[in-house]
């Protein structure tokens, strides 16, 4: 699709098909250009170009970063009323700082477990599902103690480890949203187990396909899609794999309008586990850096998913997921009206527009500051007002480093 976008919204991976000016006015040799770096974008800005045309079939799409007012307008709803507060469980047993170190260990062990499982299955060994059951219980317990610790740490990502990190992240999201919606303990466990194993069938997909740097051929994509069937086969021998657990694995690529795979299920044919798994899988994939994909920020990911409501994904579940994450999910970099940059570390409990943040940078003085936490719900004024989410790369800020520092303090 060809669309016009403002230059300040460009990011690496975009394919410009028309600079919207004469060939002499833009800084490149040809009128078509794939943006490879932020320095390319700066050259376009310096040339005085404000809008360009991009081709979304040849490069990544652009979804605008939203202010809170734009967000509410875009989603056409007052999110405070999407799910009544009393229907979501936000109880916290321990402070974030206390849970972070323990959560990091749980995350690391789950990641290592998946890596070993892929190796074992490729060499003909049986999946050790009991170990995954124990890992899932640890994840649920951590989310119960403090729902934001693992969510925050799930932002620490390494594109070379995407396959394993993605499954752990989806399980964290599954545990969090299932608990927030006050599902029964067995359901929370079954959906979280399905989430951590939703891509286990990829252990039987060749690395040259999984890690290919570029678009898959039609034949390669057909092989990749078989990971769903392989996953079911791997779990079929285990009594711990209940119908709910298997539904996440079998249906996370199904879509409401019947365009998904492997069975092209539609509407009510798709189980709750399949519908929920689809949203969580796509959200983490959109916000993760992969070999062939530049990540988008959480608001952009939520917007992209929401635009497919009742087409690909169930609207009510999307709304509940937004309510659970908050408009500014943990790990987001935001700009305060006061001129400070801050990382969201805890979603707002009483007001999703007022999370707890960690101040890290003073834009007025253009200097980093000694990080300190601030609960935006405990005050008013510019220091307690978020203007919008910003791109960390634009300010050369590595959010990973700040998150690592938090749990190592």
Image (cartoon, rainbow, N blue to C red):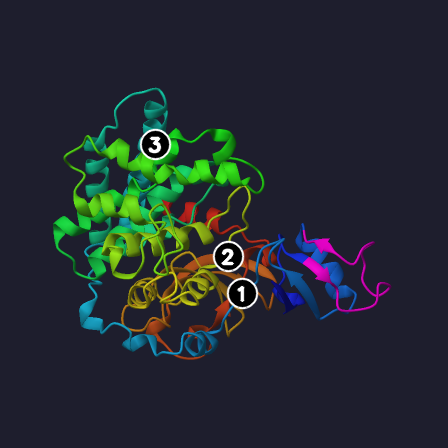
- Upstream in sequence: badge 1 or badge 2: 1
- For mark 2, give the secondary structure: loop
Q: Are marks 1 and 2 in contact (CB under 8 Å)?
A: yes
Please provide percent x and percent y for residue 121.
32, 25
Say the numbered circle drawn on residue 296: 2
Residue 397 vs residue 347: left or right?
right
Q: Secondary structure at mark 1?
A: loop
Residue 381 versus residue 223 in the image, above or below: below
Label 2 or label 3, whichever lies nearer to me, is 2
Nearer the observer: mark 1 or 3; the answer is 1
| 86 in the magenta segment | no
Upstream in sequence: badge 2 or badge 3: 3
Horizontal and vertical percent position of residue 236: 21, 33
For mark 3, what is the residue?
112
Which range is magenta?
16-35
Residue 10 seen in the figure:
yes
371 relative position to 138: left or right: right
Residue at 54% from the left image edge and 65% from the top image edge: 63
Q: Quadrant of residue 408?
A: top left
* Residue toward you, 253 or 337: 253
């Amino acid at each position: 699709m060809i669309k016009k976008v403002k230059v300040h919204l460009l990011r690496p991976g975009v394919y410009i098909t028309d600079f919207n000016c004469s060939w002499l006015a833009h800084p490149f040799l040809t009128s078509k250009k794939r943006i490879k770096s932020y320095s390319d974008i700066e050259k376009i800005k310096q040339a005085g170009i404000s809008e360009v045309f991009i081709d979304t079939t040849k490069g990544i799409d652009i979804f605008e970063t939203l202010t809170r007012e734009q967000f509410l307008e875009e989603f056409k709803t007052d999110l405070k009323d999407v799910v009544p507060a009393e229907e979501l469980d936000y109880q916290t047993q321990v402070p974030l700082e206390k849970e972070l170190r323990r959560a990091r260990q749980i995350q690391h062990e789950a990641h290592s477990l998946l890596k070993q499982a892929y190796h074992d299955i490729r060499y003909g060994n049986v999946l050790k599902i009991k170990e995954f059951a124990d890992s899932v219980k640890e994840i649920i317990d951590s989310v119960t103690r403090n729902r934001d610790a693992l969510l925050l740490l799930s932002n620490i990502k390494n594109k070379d480890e995407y396959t394993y990190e993605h499954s752990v992240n989806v399980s964290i999201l599954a545990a969090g949203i299932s608990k927030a919606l006050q599902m029964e303990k067995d359901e929370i466990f079954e959906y979280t187990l399905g989430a951590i194993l939703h891509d286990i069938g990829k252990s039987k997909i060749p690395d040259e396909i999984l890690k290919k740097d570029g678009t898959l051929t039609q034949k390669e994509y057909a092989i990749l899609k078989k990971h769903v069937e392989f996953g079911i086969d791997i779990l079929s021998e285990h009594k711990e794999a209940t119908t709910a657990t298997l539904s996440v694995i079998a249906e996370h690529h199904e879509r409401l309008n019947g365009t998904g795979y492997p069975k092209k299920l539609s509407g009510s044919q798709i189980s709750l586990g399949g519908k929920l798994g689809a949203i969580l899988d796509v959200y983490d994939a959109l916000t993760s850096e992969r070999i062939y994909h530049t990540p988008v920020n959480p608001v952009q990911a939520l917007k992209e998913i929401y635009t497919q409501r009742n087409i690909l994904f169930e609207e009510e579940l999307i709304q509940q997921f937004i309510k659970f994450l908050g408009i500014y999910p943990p790990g987001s970099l935001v700009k305060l009206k006061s001129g400070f940059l801050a990382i969201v570390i805890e979603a707002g409990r009483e007001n999703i527009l007022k999370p707890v943040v960690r101040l890290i940078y003073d834009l007025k003085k253009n200097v980093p500051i000694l990080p300190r936490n601030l609960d935006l719900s405990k005050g008013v004024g510019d220091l307690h007002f978020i203007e919008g989410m910003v791109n960390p790369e634009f300010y050369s800020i590595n959010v990973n480093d700040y998150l690592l520092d938090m749990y190592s303090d």
